């Protein structure tokens, strides 16, 4: 009986499949827009400016998954080809790199970022990540401190 009912419903709905699919797409995009606005309102997020020359300037940038995260200012000029990050164990080096990567991917995906107004990001054709350790961002544990 259940199969018969489902087949009947399918037959009635089938002629409207294209409209239903279109409506689902529209609802999905409206939900995305609503989520972006909510993220901006609740997290003090901003839509960053786009730099024409791959320059990055992030003002008080924070990782979106870390509660009570320490905000940092970051500036990479257009001529920068490499960086060296140094500091003590559990000093925040890895979380800063993850923040930079996630922030860049979020910005290039059209999402707001947790940073102050005036922040700028470049547009990169490729972004690579090699994250091979078992750190816990949610628990604020680095590889060193989690052992």
Image (spheres, rainbow, N blue to C red):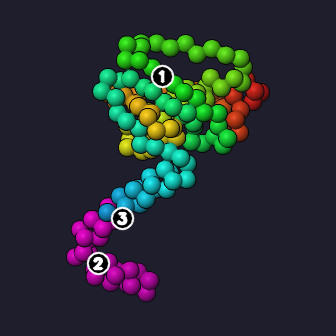
Residue 142 vs residue 82, the one in the foreground = 82
Q: Which mark is residue 13?
A: 2
Residue 94: quarter of image = top right
Relative horizontal placement of residue 115, taking residue 5 as reference (left or right):
right
Image: 91 above or below 64: above
Pointer 1 or 2: first along the chain: 2
Q: Quadrant of the C terminus?
A: top right
Residue in the picture at 60% in, 42% down: 65
Residue stretch rendered in magenta on the structure? 1-25
State the separation of the CA atoms marked 3 and 2: 18 Å
Q: Which residue has dot 1 on it?
A: 75
Relative horizontal placement of residue 49, taking residue 21 as reference (left or right):
right
The x, y position of residue 132, in whole percent, is 58, 26
Residue mark closest to the camera, 3 vs 2: 3
Q: Which residue has dot 3 on it?
A: 27
Assign the magenta stretch its main secondary structure.
helix
Relative horizontal placement of residue 115, taking residue 134 as reference (left or right):
left
**Magenta residue check for 15:** yes
**Magenta residue check for 16:** yes
Residue mark closest to the camera, 3 vs 1: 1
Image: 7 above or below 48: below
Question: What SS does tag 2 mark?
Answer: helix
Residue 36 vs residue 73, the one in the foreground = 73
């Amino acid at each position: 009986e259940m199969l018969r009912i489902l087949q009947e419903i399918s037959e009635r709905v089938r002629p409207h499949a294209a409209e239903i699919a279109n409506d689902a797409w529209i609802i999905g995009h409206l939900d995305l827009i609503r989520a972006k606005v909510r993220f901006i309102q609740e997290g003090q997020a901003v839509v960053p400016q786009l730099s024409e020359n791959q320059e990055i300037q992030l003002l008080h940038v924070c990782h979106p998954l870390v509660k009570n995260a320490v905000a940092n200012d970051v500036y990479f000029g257009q001529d920068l080809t490499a960086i060296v990050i140094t500091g003590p164990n559990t000093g925040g080096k890895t979380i800063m790199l993850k923040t930079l990567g996630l922030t860049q991917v979020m910005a290039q995906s059209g999402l707001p970022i947790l940073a102050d107004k005036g922040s700028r990001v470049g547009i990169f054709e490729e972004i690579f990540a090699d994250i091979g350790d078992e750190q816990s961002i949610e628990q604020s544990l680095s590889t060193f401190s989690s052992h």
